[in-house]
Image (cartoon, rainbow, N blue to C red):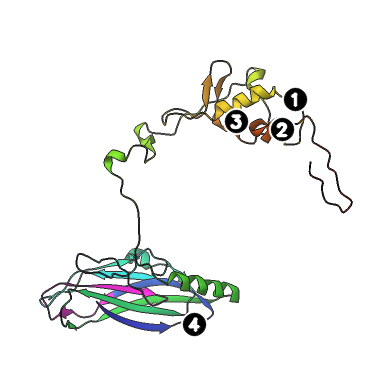
Amino acid sequence: MLIVQKKVELRRGSRHEILACDIFQDAICTTNEDNPAFIEMFVTPYPVIYSNMELTAGLGNRGPVAANDTILFKAVTSSFNANTTNYLNIDQFPSPQIGAGPSFSFYTPFVYFTMFIHFTPIDEVQVKNLAFSFMLKVKSTKAGSTQYGLGMIRERSLAQGIELMNQGRVIPKAANVGQIFPQWRYGGIRPERMIDGTAARNFFLNYSADQSEAMLDTGTLRAYVRNARVMNPYDQAFGNDTVSVGAIPDWIRFGLNRGLVSGAIRAQQPPRKLADNGNTLMF
């Protein structure tokens, strides 16, 4: 791999915002070999650290992914060799449509234009007519010392490099059951249970934690809470549908007194006792 880099200094103590970015190939580049070569191009606030990941089979040490927070701009080219006579195809991130508007902001007062040129290892590789132009439109705004310092620390930490990256997990088709939200099988939202308020036994108010008024008896209220927390199949409504009290939706368990869920309800809040030094006595 061949690394070509150029460093450009920006105004210090400022927050820099990328307003537009683009790349242009000025010449048709070739090599002295028939084996294909590829170019990765980066614009970053710190020097790019190559990884242990492959660009393709036999070509290792590619640069960071475009989604890395340190990457302001990235482009990759199609292959070229000694017989190349045309301009290369260039894929870039952000895309030309997105890159034409404000995208990224950073604080480090430098930008590095870096190329990783990948080729099959041989004794000597010559890259001819390597000429690319970068357009980077930057808006610099004065930043406070705290904001500027924290931004510098964060960007320096992120620039330390990632040698290997795990971007997801592989799910075998046979193990996909339960791995996704399966509501698409039925369409629309999940059905809901509505509480029946026509009888006193099916209705209660949520009192604040220090209220002692009698509602329903404790056992009945705890039965409501217990039934509201029943596990259901994915195509059924949350909560429970009991014979004695009717439908119990899952949402009635929100905002309950802790005594209804975890223990007995005290008939009266205990008085607060203070020691001579003002500390609260614990009972």
Query: Mark 1 and mark 2 in contact (Cβ < 8 Å)?
Result: no
Q: How far across and how far down the image is residue 99, in percent? A: 36, 67
What residue is shown with label 1? 214
Tell me which label, 2 or 1, sits earlier in the chain.
2
Q: Secondary structure at mark 1?
A: loop
Residue neighbourhood size for the residue with mark 4, other residues' Cα within 10 Å, grouped as few (<14), some (14–19), many (≥20): some
| Disc nearest the viewer among 1 and 4 | 1
Tell me which label, 4 or 3, sits earlier in the chain.
4
| Amino acid type at image mark 2 | Tyr
Q: Residue furthest front?
A: 283
Q: Secondary structure at mark 2?
A: loop
Q: Residue furthest right?
A: 276
| Amino acid type at image mark 3 | Ile
Marker disc for residue 252: 3
The image shows residue 17, relative to residue 205, as above or below, that is: below
Tell me which label, 1 or 4, sits earlier in the chain.
4
- The picture quadrant where one finds residue 144 is bottom right
Q: CA distance from mark 4 to mark 3?
A: 58 Å
Tell me which label, 3 or 2, sits earlier in the chain.
2
- The picture quadrant where one finds residue 242 is top right
Magenta stretch, residue numbers: 24-50
| Amino acid type at image mark 4 | Arg
Residue neighbourhood size for the residue with mark 1, other residues' Cα within 10 Å, grouped as few (<14), some (14–19), many (≥20): few
